[in-house]
Image (tube, grey):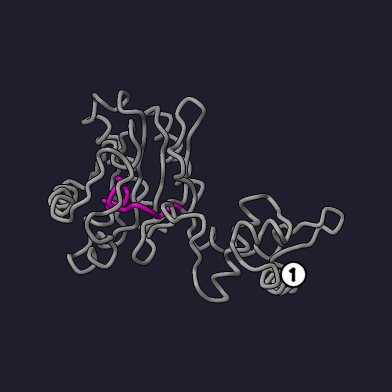
Amino acid sequence: MSVMSAPAGDQRPGSVARTFDILEAVAARGGASAKEIADVTGLPLPTVYRLVRELLDGDYLVHIREEKRFELGYKLHALGVSLHEQIGVSRQVRAEVTALHQQLGTAAYLAVHRGSQIVVVLTVDSPAHPRLPPIDFGFHEAAHATAFGKILLARMDDEERAALLDPEPMPRFGPGTITTHAELHAQLDTVAERGIAWEFGEFQAGSTCAAAAVSGVAGALVGSVAISAPDAVLAHGRAEVEQVLRACAARIGRFYRSA
């Protein structure tokens, strides 16, 4: 079951997983008391106190005594900085994705290939052209229902796809979601050939998305650049959109190859 579709009471087993549940609960609420953490996570209050004490000792949480609540600790900032350094979205690449947003009048995204996932590392949007919630930094869900996810799947062999995809019927996110492997594989053949993926109401009703593959050294997949907009915005001029996407992906690919 994906993170997006997991019910609120679903709990992951193990002490480490429960610790992460606590951190996620505190982060989501902007701070929380022990009772609030217990209510959100479903953990017994004594367990919450025990794990919170360990997180305080490690500086992953801080205790705001006057308010009787816990907030995220400074150690997490170092982890976040390290993640961004590993992903390495440079000023030049940010400028390319920003220009894509401005040129097409859509939200624009950069996703990178990490292990068996393709992860969104940059979103550029505006009040007039907002991103698709919940697609933001770190998003890696719904590969079969997103344009950038299809870019990744199109580069995989059947065994790799089988390991990543959910069993049939695959989860439905929008009215156009492809839920069978055979139909998806047929579309991925076209994506692999053209280097462009489209999705029409597959991730979210009323929205159209497109993505182009970013290739690095020896043609290896680095990631993809993608856009999203209401259906009406992308109902026409798709050939021009593909041309702009390919050009942007090529420039970003050259940067990664030279870097």
Would residue 157 be found to the left or right of residue 118 on screen? left
Pointer 1 residue: 56
Span highlighted in magenta in the image: 139-151
Residue found 38% across the figure and 54% down from its top = 141
- The answer to which quarter of the image holds residue 104 is top left
- The answer to which quarter of the image holds residue 46 is bottom right
Amino acid type at mark 1: Leu
Tell me residue 115's x, y (percent): 37, 67
Residue found 29% across the figure and 55% down from its top = 215
Residue sitting nearer the eye, 13 or 93: 13
Q: Secondary structure at mark 1?
A: helix
Q: Is residue 141 magenta?
A: yes
Q: Is residue 24 magenta?
A: no
Tell me residue 38's x, y (percent): 65, 62
Tell me residue 219's x, y (percent): 25, 59
How would you classify the magenta stretch by its main secondary structure?
helix
Direction right: furthest residue? 66
Asked if 174 appears above or below 77 in the picture, the reply is above
Asked if 149 appears above or below 17 in the picture, the reply is above
Would residue 213 be found to the left or right of residue 96 on screen? left
How would you rate the neighbour count of disc 1 (Cα within 10 Å): few for under 14, some for 14-19, many for 20 or more? some
- The answer to which quarter of the image holds residue 45 is bottom right
Residue found 68% across the figure and 50% down from its top = 30
Asked if 238 appears above or below 150 in the picture, the reply is above
